[in-house]
């Protein structure tokens, strides 16, 4: 067994002390050496990470029998789902899954101990979720955009026009410079964090009127807009596909630059809420979400790094 360098130095000092103080009593000197070597080896082990703490990407940590159940925001789901797959590659002993349902559903399930992580586009209101153990883990920033059916030949709406459309004041696209076609707003359910952000930052607190979709799935919302003539809706920009057309708000495109310069209001932080503490598979996954691997993946998927946006901007 190799003795750590610090141990050899301590042994040398102890031997000299023993010779002086105990007049060559080799047995006592040996005992002192053994004791101090054990102490020094323990210290060296702690310095090298022998305390059992988890660091992101540490494949040696075993979480056998543990289950991480993630529920909530459909806007965050594309990133969460890919992160789950990558985490499972490193920790195949963990049963881990992610599903949507909406931000409010995510907050309700985690606070009712029905999920381990609740994903949300919005902050948890402490008056609604008063549990002091509810902990917020911000993982990235998401930008949202208005979208229309491709037959609608407009490229931008101003805030008042959007308010009028989603409150039933404006009912035909020709009233806002579009074709003579009835407007069909596609509303998200009240469990949607995306809807909460839209109502707050675009409608200015005004409530949408109409019949909301029963599903908060981003793909369902996009499909409804794509296949409904004259439809308009809103979705995370990361989810946009060629079946619909993204449009600007007040002539401003939904992107990182316009968030940073304060000209685009429809965006929010993506949160993962938990009630658990201590080192376990859940906290390991949350650490994993902050690793360069996942943060780079987030940017590839169209999300924005938290470090690129200041909290006071929202």
Image (tube, rainbow, N blue to C red):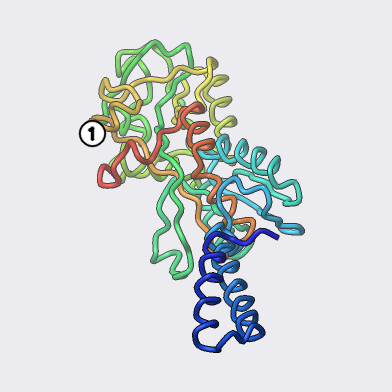
Can residue 105 be seen by looking at this rendering? no
Q: Residue furthest front?
A: 23
Q: Nearer the viewer, residue 306 or 259?
A: 306
The residue located at (42%, 36%) in the rendering is: 142
Q: Nearer the viewer, residue 268 or 108?
A: 268
* Residue 166 found in image quarter: top left
Q: Position of residue 249 (x, y in %)?
A: 30, 25
Residue identified by numbered label 1 = 262
- The mark total stands at 1
Q: Residues within 10 Å of mark 1 (few under 14, many from 20)?
A: few
Q: Position of residue 38 (x, y in %)?
A: 62, 73
Q: Is residue 109 left or right of residue 196?
A: right
Q: Position of residue 198 (x, y in %)?
A: 37, 39
Could you say whether the residue bearing mark 1 is in a helix, strand or loop? loop
The residue located at (58%, 60%) in the rendering is: 4
Q: Quadrant of the N terminus?
A: bottom right
Can residue 181 be seen by looking at this rendering? yes
């Amino acid at each position: 067994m190799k003795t750590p360098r610090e141990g050899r130095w301590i042994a040398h000092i102890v031997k000299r002390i023993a010779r002086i103080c105990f007049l060559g009593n080799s047995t006592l000197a040996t005992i002192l050496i053994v004791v101090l070597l054990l102490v020094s080896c323990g210290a060296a082990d702690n310095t090298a990470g022998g305390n059992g703490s988890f660091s992101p990407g540490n494949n040696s940590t075993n979480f056998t029998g543990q289950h991480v159940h993630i529920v909530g925001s459909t806007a965050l789901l594309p990133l969460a789902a890919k992160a789950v797959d990558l985490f499972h590659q490193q920790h195949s002993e963990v049963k881990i899954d992610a599903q949507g349902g909406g931000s409010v559903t995510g907050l309700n399930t985690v606070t009712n101990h029905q999920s381990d992580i609740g994903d949300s586009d919005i902050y948890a209101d402490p008056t609604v979720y008063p549990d002091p153990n509810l902990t917020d883990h911000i993982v990235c920033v998401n930008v949202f955009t208005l979208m229309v059916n491709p037959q609608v030949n407009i490229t931008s709406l101003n805030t008042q026009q959007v308010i009028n459309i989603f409150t039933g004041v404006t009912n035909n696209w020709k009233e806002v410079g579009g074709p003579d076609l009835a407007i069909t707003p596609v509303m998200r359910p009240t469990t949607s964090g995306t809807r909460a952000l839209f109502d707050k930052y675009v409608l200015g607190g005004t409530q949408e009127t109409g019949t909301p979709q029963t599903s908060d799935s981003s793909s369902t919302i996009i499909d409804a807009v794509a296949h409904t003539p004259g439809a308009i809706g809103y979705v995370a920009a990361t989810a946009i596909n060629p079946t619909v057309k993204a449009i600007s708000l007040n002539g401003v495109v939904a992107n990182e630059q316009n968030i940073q310069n304060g000209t685009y209001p429809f965006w929010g932080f993506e949160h993962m809420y938990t009630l658990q503490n201590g080192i376990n598979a859940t906290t390991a996954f949350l650490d994993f979400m902050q690793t360069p691997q996942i943060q780079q993946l987030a940017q590839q998927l169209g999300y924005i790094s938290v470090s690129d946006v200041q909290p006071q901007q929202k």
